[in-house]
Image (tube, coloured by chain):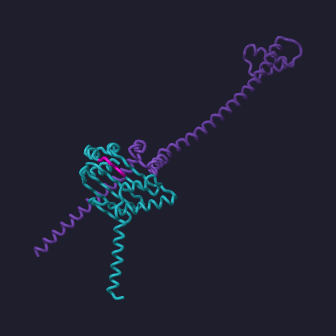
């Protein structure tokens, strides 16, 4: 009788829209277990079935979403990891190529051996020829500098000797 | 054997060495050198008839460019030991060439300068001609690389200096 009263009260609250989710669950449980046919029984039976379905769906949906998210998170993080590593390798390779390797390569290509450069192949070997000739002119320039330095030194010695001669003559 | 005989023998030996050295120091013809080392490992041989075409872009100053225009024939033989790994034949040829360059003194040329400091030697030669002037420079360095360069054209000694300065400035 207490439960029936309670149920009646709950029904009243339900129709007034004042029930809590717990009270609604009690109503659903009650009408699901109640034998016999009633309008409320049908209603709450339907609601209970639907809510279970919804719950099941929610669970499945959550599971699926979590799986998807998990996969996505893993996928993205792995992709970015590999991309970052690849980018770093590429960057190092580029830096190495443009600073060390290319320079070495250029130097090697400028030091080809057994090469005969003539008018016929000068365009193809222009850089090597220029490098060799420039090297020669650098030596010519250096020799000029040394020669002029030596001339300056000789002039200084001559001037000193002249001064010494003057002193000697005066004495 | 008295002291006079000993003196005679000593002078004979000295005379023999003097003659041998003079014979060995006879300059090889430039073209012979080029033929001898063309295509050999470690060597670069250049033989171009209008050097000004490739050198004119190597100087900025107008006077330098004008001077470069006077160079026509350019021949060069250079040896770089770093380009020869373990090729014994090439190393031997390099040493042979090094000795030739070190002693190079072409006949009929005025010696403009001669510098020797350890393994570094620099010798410059100049010859005036009706059809143009000739300049030769033979250089050996500490790392046993060496070269001989020949230039022919309507240049003066001063213009050679001008070209050397201009090219070295840009380089």
* Quadrant of the snapshot with the N terminus of chain A: top right
Chain shown purple: that is: A
Q: Which residues are magenta?
A: B71-75
Please tell me which residue lies in front, B8 or A138. Answer: B8
Q: In this picture, is A59 found above or below B150?
A: above
Residue A53's quadrant in the figure?
Answer: top right
| Residue A122 lies in quadrant | top left
- Whether residue A81 is in magenta: the answer is no
Q: Which chain is cyan?
A: B
The residue drawn where x is 40% and y is 63% is B99
Q: Is residue A164 left or right of residue A118?
A: left
**Vertical position of residue A64 compared to residue B124: above or below:** above
- The quarter in which the C terminus of chain A is drawn is bottom left
Res B153 visible? yes
Would you say the magenta stretch is mainly helix, strand or loop?
strand
Measured from the top left, where is residue B72 in percent x and y? 31, 46
Please, which residue is most extreme toward the bottom here?
A: B2
Residues A95 and B139: in front is B139
Q: Is residue B72 magenta?
A: yes
Q: Residue at x 45, y 60 (%)?
A: B93
Q: Position of residue A57 (x, y in %)?
A: 75, 23
């Amino acid at each position: 009788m207490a439960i029936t009263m309670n149920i009646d009260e709950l029904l009243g609250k339900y129709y007034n829209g004042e029930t809590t989710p717990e009270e609604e669950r009690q109503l659903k449980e009650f009408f699901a277990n109640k034998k016999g046919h009633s309008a409320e029984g049908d209603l709450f039976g339907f609601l209970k079935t639907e809510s279970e379905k919804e719950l099941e769906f929610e669970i499945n949906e959550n599971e699926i979403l979590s799986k998807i998210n998990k996969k996505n998170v893993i996928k993205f993080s792995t992709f970015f990891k590999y991309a970052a590593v690849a980018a770093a390798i590429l960057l190092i390779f580029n830096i190495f190529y443009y600073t060390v390797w290319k320079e070495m390569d250029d130097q090697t290509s400028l030091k080809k051996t057994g090469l005969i450069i003539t008018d016929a192949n000068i365009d193809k070997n222009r850089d090597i020829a220029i490098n060799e000739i420039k090297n020669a002119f650098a030596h010519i320039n250096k020799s000029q500098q040394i020669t002029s330095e030596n001339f300056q030194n000789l002039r200084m010695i001559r001037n000193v000797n002249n001064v010494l001669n003057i002193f000697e003559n005066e004495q | 054997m008295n002291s006079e005989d000993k003196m005679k023998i000593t002078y004979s030996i000295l005379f023999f060495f003097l003659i041998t050295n003079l014979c060995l120091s006879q300059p090889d013809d430039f073209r012979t050198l080029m033929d001898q080392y063309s295509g050999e490992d470690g060597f670069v041989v250049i033989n171009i008839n209008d050097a000004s075409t490739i050198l004119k872009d190597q100087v900025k100053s107008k006077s330098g460019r004008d001077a470069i225009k006077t160079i026509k024939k350019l021949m060069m033989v250079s040896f770089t030991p770093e380009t020869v790994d373990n090729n014994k034949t090439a190393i031997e040829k390099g040493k042979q060439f090094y000795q030739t360059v070190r002693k190079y003194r072409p006949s009929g040329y005025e010696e403009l300068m001669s510098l020797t400091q350890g393994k570094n030697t620099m010798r410059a030669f100049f010859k005036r001609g009706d059809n143009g002037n000739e300049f030769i420079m033979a250089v050996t360095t500490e790392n046993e690389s060496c070269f001989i360069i020949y230039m022919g054209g309507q240049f003066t000694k001063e213009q050679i200096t001008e070209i050397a300065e201009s090219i070295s400035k840009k380089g």
